Image: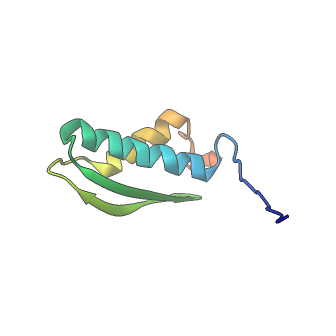
C-alpha cells in the first residue's frame, strides 16, 4: 500500500497573502463590472511598505489599479505608517 503525505498551509488575518488576495480580487471585480468578458490573471505581491500588482489583463475597461489597491488596504485597516504598512 502506497503512503501519501498531505500538507496544507493556513495563514491568519492580516498576513500578506490575504492582503494580496483581496487586492487582486478588487481589481478583478472592478474590471468585470465594466467588461464582463474580460480575462484577468492578476497577481499581487506584498511586503513591508510595498505592493506590486502585475499579470495579464485583456479588457476594454479602464480601472485605476493604484486607487483600488490603496482603497483595499485602507478598508483592511492599514491606515497608519507605524504599523509598517499603510494605504498612504
- Point 76% across, 57% down: residue: 7
The colour mode here is rainbow
Residue at horizontal 26 percent and vertical 48 percent from the top: 64
In percent of width and height, residue 67 lies at 33, 45
Relative depth, front residue between 39 and 55? 39
The answer to whether residue 84 of the structure is visible from this angle is: no
Left or right position of 77 against 25: right
Residue at 26% x, 41% y is: 32
The front one of 24 and 84 is 24
| Residue beneath the point at 63% across and 47% down | 82
Most distant residue in the front direction = 1
Question: Is residue 49 or residue 16 the one in the foreground?
Answer: 16
The x and y percentages for residue 76 are 53, 36
Which of the 4 image quadrants contains residue 52? bottom left
Please provide percent x and percent y for residue 34.
19, 39
* Count of numbered labels shown in the rendering: 0
Picture quarter with the N terminus: bottom right
Q: Is residue 35 left or right of residue 77?
A: left
As rendered, which of 5 and 39 lies closer to the eye?
A: 5
For residue 54, above or below residue 17: below
Regarding residue 64, the answer to whether it shows in the image is: yes
Q: Residue furthest left?
A: 60
Q: Is residue 80 left or right of residue 3?
A: left
Amino acid at each position: 500500500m502506497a503512503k501519501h503525505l498531505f500538507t496544507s498551509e493556513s495563514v491568519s488575518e492580516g498576513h500578506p497573502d490575504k492582503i494580496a488576495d483581496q487586492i487582486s480580487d478588487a481589481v478583478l471585480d472592478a474590471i468585470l463590472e465594466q467588461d464582463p468578458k474580460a480575462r484577468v490573471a492578476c497577481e499581487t505581491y506584498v511586503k513591508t511598505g510595498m505592493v506590486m500588482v502585475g499579470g495579464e489583463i485583456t479588457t476594454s475597461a479602464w480601472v485605476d489599479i493604484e486607487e483600488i489597491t490603496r482603497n483595499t488596504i485602507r478598508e483592511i485597516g492599514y491606515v497608519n505608517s507605524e504599523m509598517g504598512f499603510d494605504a498612504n
